[in-house]
Amino acid sequence: MVEKMSRILLAVILGLVASSALLPVSDGAKKPLSSAPRKEDVPYIKCQVCEKLASRLHQLVKEKQVQISPKKISEYEIIEIAENVCNLKKEEADWMLKIDIVEKGDKLQLVEQEEEGMCNSECKTIEAACQKVIGYSDTDVSEYIYKSKPDLASLVNHLCKDLTDACSKNPPPVPKDRVPGEPFVAKPSKDAEMDKIMRSMQGMPGAPGMKVYSREDIEKYKDNPGKFGNEDEDDDDDEDEEEDDKFPKNLGKVLKESSKKEEWKKTITKELKKKGEVLKRHAQRVSNRVRRWWKKIRSSSSKKPKSEL
């Protein structure tokens, strides 16, 4: 069933790619803009991003509850939404694609657009601000939503003032010599649809390794669909056989073993790094909860009347 679904989705994606390949390319598209986030802009938009983040969280949780009704949404499902809402690779973060950063006087304003825009520097800057805001508070805000079922105003206040300092003070004025950001350019509808499908497939079995092929690739394999997607494996096998023929058997064996060892080293290093990040996040969350608990203890003890000597 999963394999059949993957084939159907792949067919849809290929059709979209083939169609978009026929569209004319504008002169502006030939010069791609920088996609690096402008981290220096984060302090000027942090509060606005937090408010929109809270609004999106509130909306997504409501939509999820309607989707699984009459079953009650679990805290784990809310945590999953909170973890994805600031990640542009996930469909929960689509809201960031419709925002333009506009300079007005000495302030930066987030202006919502009707369509998704090309994700360049401004898009990545909003993502950076969003991730900075939610930080290690994703589980805390999820717990608050699950237990308190707050309205939007309460959620904004809790996330942007209690859990974080995103809106604790007014943003600083924007420097007069700030270089303006790129203009908002609406993404072609076919590209937007294809990107949306790809984001929605994140986490599906077989989807992470899926490739997007060019029109030339599609034309090449349209008469032999059985080999579509397997060309890399075939090429690798042929290359291995050719290389073995060129080298003495013993030398070829040594090189293969060395290659395997290097792959194992890279894999182990990568996994250790991932585990370290997970442990760091858990430690930070525990630390945050301990600080809040201790703050409550101190607050309650200070309210008690002192006994007379």
Image: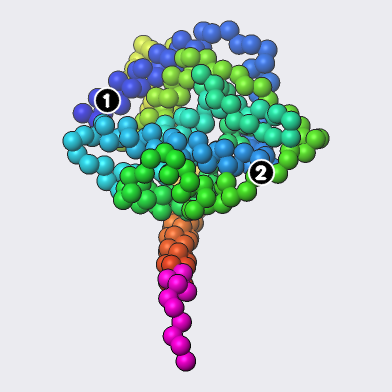
Give how far apart the Cα atoms at labels 1 and 2 are.
48 Å
Q: Residue furthest front?
A: 308
Q: Residues within 10 Å of mark 1 (few under 14, many from 20)?
A: few
Image quarter of the N terminus: top left
Q: Residue at x 46, y 29 (%)?
A: 94
Q: Residues within 10 Å of mark 2 (few under 14, many from 20)?
A: some
Q: Position of residue 80 (x, y in %)?
A: 36, 44
Tell whether 142 sits left or right of 252. Answer: left
Tell whether 203 sits left or right of 159. Answer: left
Is residue 208 in view from this perspective?
no
Q: Residue 74 bears which disc, if any?
A: none
* Up/down of 104 relative to 160, above or below: above
Residue 292 on the magenta segment: no
Residue stretch rendered in magenta on the structure: 299-309
Q: Residue at x 36, y 46 (%)?
A: 145
Q: Residue 171 bears which disc, if any?
A: 2
Q: Secondary structure at mark 2?
A: loop
Q: Which residue is more in the foreground, 43 or 210?
A: 43
